[in-house]
Image (tube, grey):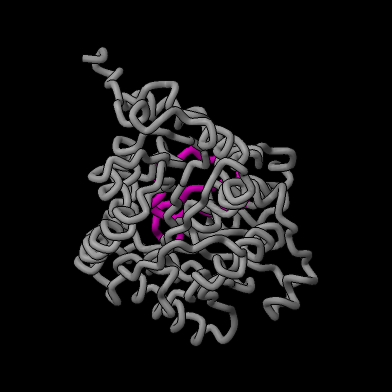
Amino acid sequence: MKRTIAVVTTSRADYSHLYWPLKELQAHPNVDLKVIVMASHLSPEFGSTVREIEADGFPIAAKLECLLSSDTDVGMAKSIGMGVLSLADALGQMRPDLLLLIADRYEMLAPASVALALRIPIAHIEGGEISEGAIDDAVRNALTKMSHIHFTSTETARERVISMGEEPWRVHHAGAPSLDHMRRSQLLSKEELEQKLGLDLDTSTVLIAYHPVTILRDTTREAEALFTALGQIDEQLLFCYPNADAGSRELIERTQAFLKMRGHGRLFVNLPAVTYWSLLKHVRVMVGNSSSGIMETGSFALPTVNVGIRQQGRERAANVLDTEAEAECILKKIIEARRESFRRSLEGMANPYGDGHGAERIVNVLANLPAAETLLLKRGVASGGA
């Protein structure tokens, strides 16, 4: 009999990581795939990215509106509650054999909580990592303890999940599935990118992916230093939209004002995954505080300046230059990242987050799991299995 696996996606970020696992699950003869689409995917403000999922041909079993039109932490908290209410009905009716979640977005607390109440086993991708400057860190750890099967991006992350009391047989080092794009997707050439986006990539280009720092009460406190530093460089600047967190609208407005004053540069509401990965291949430097700057840029040996505390504690490769959120420090690191000597020093580097085979490893495990009763009964090994 086929195993019904439901997968939740809430934003462009997690969908780009889930694309190849979804393709593998969709093609597997023993899996009945159900995709649940929520939150910013359904928001016109964030590009209505549900259309990308539909265009990719995945079976959308439910579209759940739960993202409040807000720019506050109260709005974030209420969105979790809206998600719980919507998912209680959807999952209560669907009753999948397994629920697959990824990463650390706050919205993922909703499906995990509902699945726990409904006794639906949970598989979680990208647990065991650290990002001390965001609430994502606590969300990730909560999801780990609520989940029954784990797929980590690095061996260190696997060891960390086991140290949290998860039985070793449940924890699999798969690698980050986002890296499958670099091996399996047809990335765009420089000329194709230029035509698609209306850019001249012969001009030295910096890609900026910067998000609110959700552990801070003032989530955009570090942003002024970033914009001050960026105002002192001559490169073509390409900005990606921030995540739908408290402070995102303020960041969007600040970016728009910065570009208007500068007179050139671009702000992209939504870049399809393959377009985004292709940009990583062709820009000169990446700047910001996104996990993408830590996890994916290593596959391109792309010099990356990581700003502030958001990704503090995360494993990183040699291409990542960390800096405090001070304009002078950021500028110095950008100058260092632009040096040809630094770029040459990265030749032949390996990405610690995987080899582009993550989706295969994940789906091979998911398709051969024991029955739900076995999965649901977890033993606390850290305390001696009392």
- Check the picture and name the quadrant holding the C terminus: top left
Query: From the viewer's perspective, is residue 16 above or below residue 255?
Result: above
Percent position (x, y) of residue 362?
55, 38
Percent position (x, y) of residue 60?
49, 63
Q: Nearer the viewer, residue 106 or 57?
A: 57
Percent position (x, y) of residue 3?
49, 41
Q: Which residues are magenta?
A: 303-329
In the rendered structure, the answer to whether residue 347 lies left or right of residue 381 reads: right
| Residue depicted at 52% across the width and 42% down the height | 2
Percent position (x, y) of residue 321?
53, 48
Q: Is residue 159 magenta?
A: no
| Residue depicted at 45% across the width and 32% down the height | 157
Q: Nearer the viewer, residue 21 or 330?
A: 21
For residue 25, say whether it is visible: yes
Q: Is residue 309 magenta?
A: yes
Q: Nearer the viewer, residue 177 or 303?
A: 177
| Residue depicted at 24% across the width and 65% down the height | 82
Q: Nearer the viewer, residue 169 or 284?
A: 169
| Residue depicted at 53% across the width and 53% down the height | 292
